[in-house]
Image: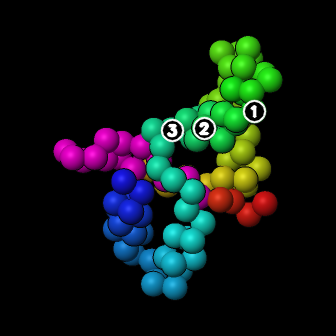
């Protein structure tokens, strides 16, 4: 699936120059339903470990908004089509 997601992201970024697109694709982390889902998966080891009881109290979308605002992650929206559901491509940010 990840290979297909990278192909789709490359299609979305087809307007970029090849070397620019390669730089963006090198920062690719994965495709998720939302930025919050990425945060949930990123924090899963910590939350499923000693702090499992906090899992339902965490505002994953809020953390994602903070990470986006701070440049930790960047997302590219994917509206989807008939075969692919909508979601976001998550890329590593500048910090």
x%, y% of residue 63? 71, 34
Q: Residue furthest left?
A: 82
Quarter of the C terminus within the rendering? bottom right
Residue 49 picture quarter: top right
Residue at 51% across / 78% down in the picture? 22
Helix, strand or loop under label 3: loop
Q: Is label 1 in contact with label 3 (beta carbons under 8 Å)?
A: no
Inspect the magenta stretch and tell me whether residue 60 lies in it: no
Residue wearing tag 3: 34
Label 2 sits on residue: 41
Instruction: State the CA–CA distance, disc 2 to disc 3.
Output: 11 Å
Residue 12 can be seen in this image: no
Which residue sits at x=55%, y=62%? 28
Tag nearer the camera, 2 or 3? 2
Q: Earlier in the sequence, mark 1 or mark 2?
A: 2
Check disc 1 and report the residue beneath it: 46
Q: Residues within 10 Å of mark 1 (few under 14, many from 20)?
A: few
Give the mark, 1 or 3, whose residue is nearer the N terminus.
3
Q: Closest to the observer: 70 or 4? A: 4
Q: Tell me residue 54's x, y (percent).
A: 74, 17
Helix, strand, or loop for circle 1? helix
Q: Specify whether 4 is left or right of 93.
A: left
Magenta segment, which residues? 78-91
């Amino acid at each position: 699936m990840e290979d297909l997601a990278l192909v789709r992201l490359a299609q979305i970024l087809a307007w970029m120059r090849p070397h620019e697109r390669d730089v963006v694709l090198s920062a690719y982390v994965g495709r998720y339903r939302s930025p919050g889902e990425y945060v949930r998966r990123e924090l899963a080891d910590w939350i499923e470990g000693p702090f499992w009881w906090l899992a339902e109290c965490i505002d994953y979308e809020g953390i994602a908004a903070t990470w986006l605002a701070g440049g930790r992650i960047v997302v590219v929206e994917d509206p989807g089509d008939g075969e692919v559901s909508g979601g976001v491509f998550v890329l590593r940010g500048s910090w």
